[in-house]
Amino acid sequence: MKKNLKKAIITGLILLAASSAFAKEKKSKSKGKAKEVNVGYVDVTGSGIITDVKGIARDQGYFDEEFKKIGVKLNLVPMTGAGPAINEALAGGSLDIGELGDVPAVLGKANGVDTVLISTGGLLNGASVIAGKGTPYKSLKDLKGKTIATQRGAFMHRTLATLLADEGLTFDDIQFVNVNAQTAAEMLVTGNVDAAVVGGVTLTRLYEQGYNIVIDYRQNRGGVSGGGTIARRKFVEQNPEVIKAYLTAIARATNYAKKNTNELKRLWESVGESGESYEYLYPKHNNYPDIVARPESLQNLKDTLNFLLEYELITKDRKFSVDEWYDPTFAEYAVAEAAKK
């Protein structure tokens, strides 16, 4: 199982490297400042509707104000393929900035997607192991030999690896099914897999429908993860004012969320999700980014890199310095500017 997993990932990385090389050649011919910026984000609801601080930045006019100053158009691009899809789009040049989970962000960087980490999202992501309604499973040991679905290269993959290790198990002890979160949930509902590892709105929907939570991320260290905002290095070098504008709008929205503690819950409910599900995921109403990275967020990224090395998802020669990857100057500027507003 591990050999097949490794082979599939290596094949994907070869394609990604080729895409990255093509993007570098294509972009090297372009000159001048950007007139538009494309920001990709994980579409957690599948609706294309924003439910986090980007929604506040939009609704309060912060994006409009900051980007009008520099004469650049902002395009927010929903990505249903989550972090791996954002990496591919950054490598191909169709995205300039991406917001994604820690595993795909680090994996992309390690395998040739030339990015800069410009901000972090905090350790707020959570993934739980869910089984069918009425099933007797109470631990991963009960699921030994069973089919478990989650997305390879996403933070849920790292969660599953950590939880398996805690039980003295490996991927060889289960039948691993590689699909995105929405498909994993659908396969669980239809009975095509025994369990799924999912987070966010996918998790809350299954929870509210009475599915069996085998391992609750809120009660297990392996279930909590983080994320970050990354940008193509060449784009950052050519358009530093765009990065500053984007993060300043996000910092202003974060300040607004801290003062208006029900605003993020309102956005969540605006797409038809229940207030109860929001309270389940974010009881402190704090699903906003760090902006400037905290030490624990950077350590989480380093731990993620070690996970990828341990499970041979990247080779040792792909190891890089997280501290050098992170450029705090843009986030520090944004926080200072937002404080003036």
Image (cartoon, rainbow, N blue to C red):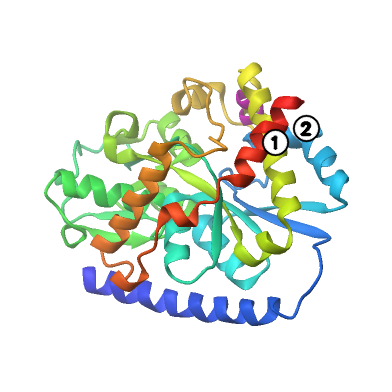
Residue depicted at 72% across the width and 37% down the height: 249
Residue depicted at 51% across the width and 56% down the height: 83
Left/right placement of residue 308 relative to residue 35 reads left
Badge 1 density bin: few <14, some 14–19, many ≥20, Cα 10 Å? some
Residue depicted at 48% across the width and 72% down the height: 112
Q: Secondary structure at mark 2?
A: helix
Q: Disc 2 marks which amino acid?
A: Asp
Examine the structure image and report whether residue 267 is included in the region drawn in magenta: yes
| Residue 157 versus residue 292 in the image, above or below | below
Residue depicted at 63% across the width and 29% down the height: 254
Which corner quadrant of the image does residue 147 belong to?
bottom left
Left/right placement of residue 222 relative to residue 339 reads left
Badge 2 density bin: few <14, some 14–19, many ≥20, Cα 10 Å? few
Give residue 257's position: percent from left, percent from top: 64, 24
Give the magenta part as a residue range.
264-268
Examine the structure image and report whether residue 337 is included in the region drawn in magenta: no
Q: Nearer the viewer, residue 17 or 326?
A: 326
Callout 1 touching callout 2 (CB < 8 Å): yes
**Residue that mark 1 sits on:** 55
Give residue 184's position: percent from left, percent from top: 41, 52
Q: Disc 1 marks which amino acid?
A: Gly
Give residue 263's position: percent from left, percent from top: 66, 22
Q: Nearer the viewer, residue 267 or 19?
A: 19
Q: Nearer the viewer, residue 25 or 17?
A: 25
- The chief SS type of the magenta part is helix
Q: Secondary structure at mark 1?
A: helix
**Residue that mark 2 sits on:** 59
Note whether residue 1 is visible: no
Left/right placement of residue 172 relative to residue 316 reads left
